[in-house]
Amino acid sequence: MIACDFCGTEYKPGVDSPLEAIVCPNCHAPRAIDSSQPNFFAVFGFKPAFGLDETALARSYYAFSSALHPDRFSASGNPAIIERASDWMSLVNEAYQTLKKPADRRGYLLELLLKDAPKSKPPLPVELSEEWFTIQDLLMDDLDAAMRALKLFSEKITSENETITRELQSLEREWDQSAESAVLSKMNDAMKRQAYVVSLARNVERTQQTMTGANQ
């Protein structure tokens, strides 16, 4: 049992709904956020997983927003309740914005699960690196050839990015089923490779824009 800080009502937090563990059943004021901030999955009562029911997530988010929005408590005239509601809504908004996007959810969950794991340096796509350096040399000697090479290289990078994305999706499903740490390490390495590929794609795009502008 816990007692509401504002009306004194004693109640046992519900287990079926995350909101029931937060909101007083009498005055509806929220409890204080624990000193150890709950992870974003726990906020909504979800088990940490890469594959999340996004419809259920949105439904839970709107329920929280309805129950905890500071405007709901403005008539109370109690700044402590309003401040507490604001703290909850800040946490709920950040959690929702992170979990609703698969890529952000993946990064957050990996950070959560690998926070105590040793850092690794996965092998980067050496072939792509060497090809990019070759294009840099072409830019000095033959602009037409460089433009053709950039176009082909851009297509190759797009294909590589799509391949890594499929790999990550497969690993996500595998971890959700087995929760093996080895799968997480593979995902972490794949994400670092993808970050490198995306960085190369940005460099290619900037170079193409510069060359196009120079030829006009």
Image: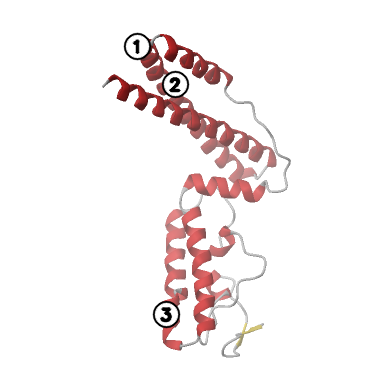
Q: Which residue position holds label 2?
A: 156
Q: Give the mark, 1 or 3, whose residue is nearer the N terminus.
A: 3
Q: Quarter holding the C terminus? A: top left
Q: Quarter holding the N terminus? A: bottom right
Judge whether 144 appears above or below 9 on screen. above
Q: Which residue position holds label 1?
A: 144
Which element is circle 2 on?
A: helix
Q: CA distance from mark 2 to mark 1?
A: 19 Å
Q: Give the mark, 2 or 1, whose residue is nearer the N terminus.
A: 1
Please say if the residues under marks 2 and 1 sit with CB atoms less than 8 Å apart.
no
Q: Residues within 10 Å of mark 1 (few under 14, many from 20)?
A: few
Q: Is residue 140 visible?
A: yes
Query: What amino acid is at disc 2?
Result: Lys
Q: Position of residue 71 (x, y in %)?
A: 41, 78
Q: CA distance from mark 2 to mark 3?
A: 53 Å
Residue 58 is left or right of residue 174, and the answer is: left
Q: Is residue 17 visible?
A: no
Q: Which residue position holds label 3?
A: 72
